[in-house]
Image (spheres, helix red, strand yellow):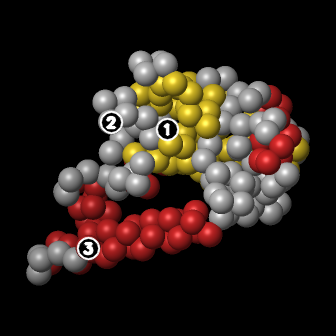
Amino acid sequence: MSIRFTAKARRGMAALSVVAGLALGVAGCGGGDSEDKKPENSASASQDSGPGPSAQEGQADTPLAELKGSNGLLLQITSAERDSGGFVTVNGNLKNDGAKSVAIPASLSGNETEIIRNGRSLGGATLVDSQGKKRYYVLRDTDGRPLTTTGLQTIRSGETVAVFMQFPAPPPDTTEVTLQLPTFATAPIAISG
């Protein structure tokens, strides 16, 4: 299976990795307390102190939403974050809960020629703002490539693939939208940030 990301998405993921690494490095810096040096206390100290779990820990524990698709596919949404640049990035995991390998349905890419031309993706996803009565489509770069995970082909039974989708941001007072993806159930998700 091959997954391609746009240059902008790679930079965003690299920046997220750097921030996560810095957060882990800062969490490891403590006072001279001898209890911090014990292995059994270091795990509990990171869970019991501080402002709470990191974004990655929160993502792994409780998804914002789970959308069931065809052939045992399950999309777990782990975050939907508003960026100061005027877009919302939705992150999640696409999992094959079925007993057999599943070819990713072409319909997930949507029906726009420009997006289909760039291979299988989650380009058919939309966010619906019921309050503002608007639908937001996946953003595209200047070459027409969708700003979402691309190159999806087949997912083996039990396999999970990290995915993302970027949309224009709804107005700041909109904190909940409905995620729609062809062949999947819809689900409301909360936007943070």
Query: Label 2 vs label 1: CA separation?
Result: 22 Å
Q: Give the answer, above or below, for where 177 lies relative to 172.
A: above
**Mark drawn on residue 172:** 2
Mark 2 lies on a secondary structure that is loop
Percent position of residue 56, x then y: 43, 55
Q: Is residue 32 left or right of residue 53?
A: left
**Residue at 78% from the left image edge and 33% from the top image edge:** 72
Mark 3 lies on a secondary structure that is helix
Residue projecting furthest to the front: 142
Query: Label 1 vs label 3: CA separation?
Result: 26 Å
What crowding class fits label 1: few (fewer than 14 Cα within 10 Å), some (14-19), or many (20 or more)? some
Percent position of residue 137, x then y: 61, 37
Choose the circle earlier in sequence order: 3 or 2.
3
Tally the numbered discs: 3
Choose the circle earlier in sequence order: 2 or 1.
1
Q: Is residue 45 left or right of residue 2?
A: left
Q: Is residue 110 left or right of residue 54?
A: right
**Residue at 81% from the left image edge and 35% from the top image edge:** 111
Percent position of residue 105, x then y: 85, 38
Q: Give the answer, above or below, for where 173 lies relative to 123.
A: above
**Mark drawn on residue 53:** none
Front residue (pair 123, 70): 123
Percent position of residue 186, x then y: 61, 23
Residue under pointer 1 = 63
The type of residue carrying mark 1 is Pro
What crowding class fits label 2: few (fewer than 14 Cα within 10 Å), some (14-19), or many (20 or more)? few
Disc number lying in front (2 or 1): 2
Query: Label 3 vs label 2: CA separation?
Result: 31 Å
Residue projecting furthest to the bottom: 32
Q: Are marks 3 and 2 in contact (CB under 8 Å)?
A: no
